[in-house]
Amino acid sequence: MAIILSIETSTSVCSAALHENGKIVEVKELFTPQSAASQLAPLIEDIFSSAKISKQAINAIAVSSGPGSYTGLRIGVATAKGLCYGLDVPLIAIDSLLVLASTVNDIAKTDLLCPMIDARRMEVYCSLFTTSLDAIEPTQAKIIDSESFSEQLSSHSILFFGDGAAKCKSTLNHPNAVFFEDVYLSAKNMGNIAFQKYLGGKFEDMTLFEPNYLKEFIAKTKLT
């Protein structure tokens, strides 16, 4: 038996979940942007309290590794590492786009899946997966224009989804482009992937592991 705590903070939705052998036990989600810094720790405490499971009972902690919000990823990974050290359990890292793709792969009626995380303006973090969740294009930061994915769309239907997809709908107006709304990243969808990694012993070196930011952090200048 493996009980795994999953943490997801790479988008505006802050969430945590407990899974037992890949099956959901408890999940908590906050849909308030920029809430991870102040609310992630209480959210995790609430998870254990609601599930009536002791922290000492968990076998590993999974965290979304990016891409996504620079600040959100830092908070999520730092929290996960702290808990791993304190509880002496291993850390499992899962690509954020893979988690997003896993929410629709069983219901998609297209050839390919393209999860998208908003990276501001017309840029998104994205990748291409088969419906079996095999990645066929690497994770990338991509500026979307009318030629984006044109080669793939000429011969495959593609499902676009995630919080970066809506702004691309008018630009990617190919007949083979399909869009899902209301699909978001959540720790509740990390359970099976985390469990398979746990069984395979695919753990991170906590002294070396860093999120996949894709882009360097650029601080905003405060106007006076």
Image (spheres, helix red, strand yellow):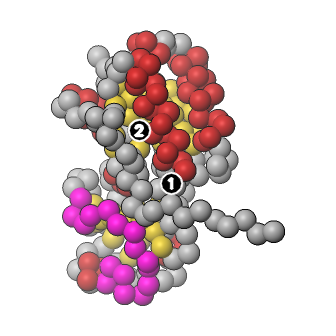
Three-letter amino acid code of the residue under disc 2: Val
Foreground disc of the pair 2, 1: 1
Question: Closest to the observer: 131 or 42?
Answer: 42
Quadrant showing the C terminus: bottom right
- Place of residue 160 in the rendered image (x, y in percent of width and height, measured from the top left): 41, 67
Is residue 25 within the magenta segment?
A: no
Q: Which residues are magenta?
A: 135-150
Q: Is residue 7 left or right of residue 111?
A: right
Q: Could you classify mark 2 by the number of other residues whose Cα lies within 10 Å: few (under 14), some (14-19), or many (20 or more)? A: many
Q: Which residue is mark 2?
A: 63
2 and 1 marks in contact (CB < 8 Å): no
Q: Is residue 204 left or right of residue 147?
A: left
Write down the quadrant of residue 220 in the picture.
Answer: bottom right
SS state under label 2 = strand
Q: CA distance from mark 2 to mark 1?
A: 14 Å
Residue drawn at x 62%, y 40% as measured from the top left: 37
Three-letter amino acid code of the residue under disc 1: Tyr
Quadrant showing the N terminus: top left
Residue drawn at x 40%, y 73% as measured from the top left: 142
Q: Is residue 149 left or right of residue 41?
A: left
Q: Is residue 176 left or right of residue 72?
A: left
Q: Could you classify mark 1 by the number of other residues whose Cα lies within 10 Å: few (under 14), some (14-19), or many (20 or more)? A: many
Q: Which residue is mark 1?
A: 70
